[in-house]
Amino acid sequence: MMHAGDVPGQLARGATLLALLVSAALPLDVQAAPARAAKAGPAAAAPAAPASAAPSASTAPRPLSESVAAIVNDEIISTYDLAQRMRLLIATSGIQPSQETLPQFQRQALVSLVDEHLQLHELKRVEKQQKMSIIATDDEVREEISSMASENNMSVDQFLGVLKAQGIGSETLYQQVRASMSWQRWIQGRYGSRLRVGEDQIKATQAHLESVASKPQYQVSEVLIDANRAGGMPQALQGAQQLVSQIQQGAPFPAVARQFSAAPTAASGGDAGWVSPGEMPPEVDAALDQLRPGQLSAPIPVKDGVYIVYLRNKRAGAGATLVNLKQAAVSLPETASSADVAAARATLMGVRAATKGCDDLESVAAKSPGVVAGDLGEAEIADLAPEFRDAAQSLAPGQVSEPIRTKVGLHLVAVCGKHASGAAQLSHDQIENRLFGQQLSMVARRYMRDLRNSATIETR
């Protein structure tokens, strides 16, 4: 007998359960199952169940070897339930199952089932005590499932076919959606009206954002593996390493985040938006500073878990100036004679006289033999080569420089656009909403931690 926090470390090594999973008549086809961020939260991101009558666990075929996987406050989680949840995780995460990843799916599936049992047990207690309805009705669950099917451009019957083709009983998703909807409703209803974001908090956040406005900003997607749920830091780190490997092999980051992340952003596929230094743990800030757009981080241990971050984009601070440039150039080696340089200069001056600016620079240059034109894209002025930097600073948009000599040739540079980098500061209401969401998420995590600590769980 143990507390809920001890569950992952007490999982059986999986001989019986994995046999149940991999020996089913229907094969797993990860690519066939669409994944989405359900409105109710990460637990509801999965293929849809039928919009007809609520599925009953008693009507679904059960394996003959079904046994007890765990007992949560006298409620049974069967090996069938566990195998079904593993299938659902595999189908919606995009991760290819293997002997290395199955134990992680087993651990995550059992933790999710334990949490859902604890949540529903708590909601039933509150309903009885306060004589109120909290748990989602069949009609509400059916409506959510119908919405999930529509967002995947499928009918409910087609969604059911996706489930069935992967050996997943529709009641598995039905129960998951019910638990997630009900719990989100209770947390929002109980704490949403009680939480207050003070003006001092908003002003402090505004001051921080202003202080880092000149620093780079990062557009980030994140996965947070909660060490408490994973059974400790070693298990969290191992799980994060496996997820990084799977993402590198093609598993969609949003799908992985929805099913494995403990961060509030899990419901939106891990999308944390644009963040400034200081908004994430220092260890994550340090990692972001070393990443280039499009790169995935290695696992990043923090105080209570392990982060995986994907840097989608990066922009310079508000104090920098960005320019869009085009050029027309004549190739000349550094050892070119004065006569060759003079001839190239005359050619480029002719191009300069004939062009109106960025719009026709390339077409005009194409008519001059030996002149090559191209778009240099957008860059921060401070990052430009010294030869181009003065022209980019002094020219207005639409103007073209005189020929500039470099080691490789003679160039005309056209400034096509110039603007200050960095986004506008968040508004008062945007900051208030962000802080409120962070507080609500923290309260919900503490609530679940208390439920786990007071629960009695047996694993078999």
Image (cartoon, rainbow, N blue to C red):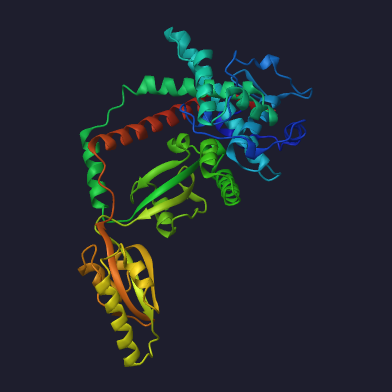
Give the vertical position of 407 relative to 43 (above or below): below
Q: Residue placed at 30% from the left, 33% from the top?
A: 433
Q: Position of residue 299 (x, y in %)?
A: 52, 51
- Tell me how many marks there are: 0
Q: Position of residue 230 (x, y in %)?
A: 56, 38
Q: Quadrant of the C terminus?
A: top right
Residue 256 appears left or right of 210: right
Q: Quadrant of the N terminus?
A: top right
Q: Residue placed at 68% from the left, 37% from the top?
A: 29
Q: Residue placed at 58% from the left, 33% from the top?
A: 6
Most extreme residue toward the front is 367
In which quarter of the view is residue 338 placed? Answer: bottom left
- From this viewpoint, is residue 263 visible? no
Q: Nearer the viewer, residue 198 or 404?
A: 404
Residue 230 appears left or right of 416: right
- From this viewpoint, is residue 310 visible? yes
Give the vertical position of 392 relative to 309 (above or below): below
Q: Nearer the viewer, residue 158 or 200?
A: 158
Q: Position of residue 424 (x, y in %)?
A: 25, 47
Give the vertical position of 190 relative to 435 (above or below): above
Residue 281 appears left or right of 399: right
Residue 389 appears left or right of 224: left
Q: Position of residue 269 (x, y in %)?
A: 48, 39
Most extreme residue toward the top is 131
Give the vertical position of 332 relative to 13 (above or below): below
Q: Residue placed at 43% from the left, 7% from the top?
A: 131
